[in-house]
């Protein structure tokens, strides 16, 4: 007790009230004490029912003609016989159709491994003709896996723009700003021809829908003609009734890129970045 911690001293003092005779009791006989420490029994596979189903399984008869398998009958404790494959180092029982999904959930439900790991586990323990196809399908549609494994997401490939047939047929437009004031203008409407990569930046004092539509009509359509297609992002100025009306009058097909995805206008974004970088460099020199 001299070297014991205060808590240990209290515990030893309490234990000293009881008998200190130490006796060994087997775990199977000491059920009450081991209740919390022992793992609950995992539900086992009923091979007797599988053996009964094998006797009426037509698919098993066709497998017996396959030379790559070595099917033998092994006696069970109940006296029934279970047909198993011994072509590998492990004895693998044949599983009839009615028990396949139950066996899958029994194996896959232990730790919910991926498709390849589950197929490997199932192949090492059981056989049936479509085991790989079935296990792959059931693993992909496993609800707990879908809920828990969210680190991988399927990404749909973006569509690609068709190559225009000539100059000024397809035009991309976008807005840049606010920028340092110049003659009262703090924004730019940038336009680029998809075929020739010809780019123009139109200064604006505001970016209202009417201002943007007028600037595009006066500075681009008036000089280069009406494009067949006009591609924009989903800004409010480009989805406004004003630009839609202008497009309808001029016979322009208005098309918007994918929301929150700059790759939808990659060619235009690169050109716009060149303008922004060049403007920033010029301002830096002036300062």
Image (tube, helix red, strand yellow):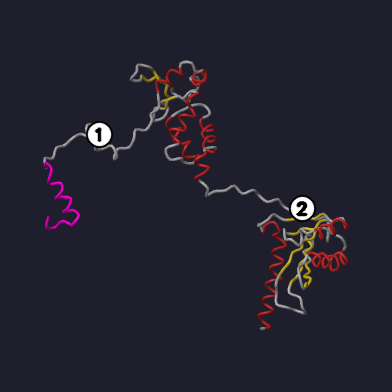
Closer to the N terminus: mark 1 or mark 2? Answer: 1
Q: Is residue 5 magenta?
A: yes
Left or right, 100 with reference to 273: left
Look at the image and tell me in which quarter the C terminus lies.
bottom right
Question: Which residue does the image show at 72% across and 69% down from the upper left?
Answer: 176
Magenta range is 1-19
Asked if residue 55 is positioned above or below residue 269 in the image, the reply reads above
| Residue under label 1 | 31
Categorize mark 1 by other alpha carbons within 10 Å: few (<14), some (14-19), many (20+): few
Question: Residue 33 location, x and y as percent?
Answer: 24, 38
User: Callout 2: helix, strand or loop?
Assistant: loop
Residues 35 and 71: in front is 35
The quarter of the picture where residue 211 lies is bottom right
Look at the image and tell me in which quarter the N terminus lies.
bottom left
Question: Which residue does the image show at 52% across and 44% down from the upper left?
Answer: 147
| Residue under label 2 | 162
Q: Is residue 161 magenta?
A: no
Question: Residue 191 location, x and y as percent?
Answer: 78, 65
The quarter of the picture where residue 246 lies is bottom right
Question: Which residue does the image show at 16% across and 37% down from the upper left?
Answer: 24
Question: Residue 4 location, x and y as percent?
Answer: 15, 56
Asked if residue 169 is positioned above or below residue 95 in the image, the reply reads below
Left or right, 65 with reference to 225: left
Question: Which residue does the image show at 77% across and 70% down from the upper left?
Answer: 201
Residues tagged 1 and 2 counted as in contact (Cβ below 8 A): no
The quarter of the picture where residue 223 lies is bottom right
Asked if residue 42 is positioned above or below residue 275 in the image, the reply reads above
Nearer the observer: mark 1 or 2; the answer is 1
Categorize mark 2 by other alpha carbons within 10 Å: few (<14), some (14-19), many (20+): few
Left or right, 253 with reference to 101: right
Cα–Cα span, label 1 and label 2:
75 Å
Asked if residue 104 is positioned above or below residue 61 in the image, the reply reads below
């Amino acid at each position: 007790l001299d070297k014991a911690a205060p808590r240990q001293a209290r515990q030893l003092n309490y234990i000293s009230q009881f008998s200190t005779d130490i006796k060994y009791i087997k775990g199977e006989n000491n059920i009450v004490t081991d209740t919390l420490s022992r793992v609950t029994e995992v539900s086992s596979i009923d091979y007797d029912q599988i053996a009964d189903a094998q006797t009426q399984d037509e698919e098993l008869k066709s497998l017996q003609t396959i030379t790559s398998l070595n099917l033998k009958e092994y006696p069970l404790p109940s006296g029934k016989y279970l047909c198993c494959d011994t072509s590998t180092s492990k004895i693998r029982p044949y599983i009839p159709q009615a028990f396949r999904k139950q066996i899958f959930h029994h194996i896959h439900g232990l730790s919910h491994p991926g498709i390849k790991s589950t197929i490997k586990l199932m192949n090492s323990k059981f056989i049936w003709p479509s085991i790989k196809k079935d296990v792959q399908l059931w693993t992909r549609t496993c609800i707990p896996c879908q809920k828990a494994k969210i680190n991988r997401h399927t990404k749909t490939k973006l569509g690609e723009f068709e190559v225009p047939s000539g100059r000024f047929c397809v035009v991309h437009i976008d807005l840049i700003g606010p920028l340092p004031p110049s003659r009262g203008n703090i924004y730019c409407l940038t336009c680029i021809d998809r075929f020739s990569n010809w780019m123009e930046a139109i200064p604006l004092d505001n970016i209202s829908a009417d201002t943007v539509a007028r600037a595009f009509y006066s500075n681009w359509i008036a000089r280069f003609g009406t494009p067949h297609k006009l591609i924009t992002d989903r800004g409010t100025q480009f989805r406004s009734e004003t630009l839609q009306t202008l497009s309808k009058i001029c016979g322009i097909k208005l098309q918007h890129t994918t929301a929150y995805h700059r790759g939808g206008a990659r060619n235009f974004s690169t050109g716009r970045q060149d303008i922004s970088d060049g403007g920033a460099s010029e301002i830096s020199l002036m300062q």
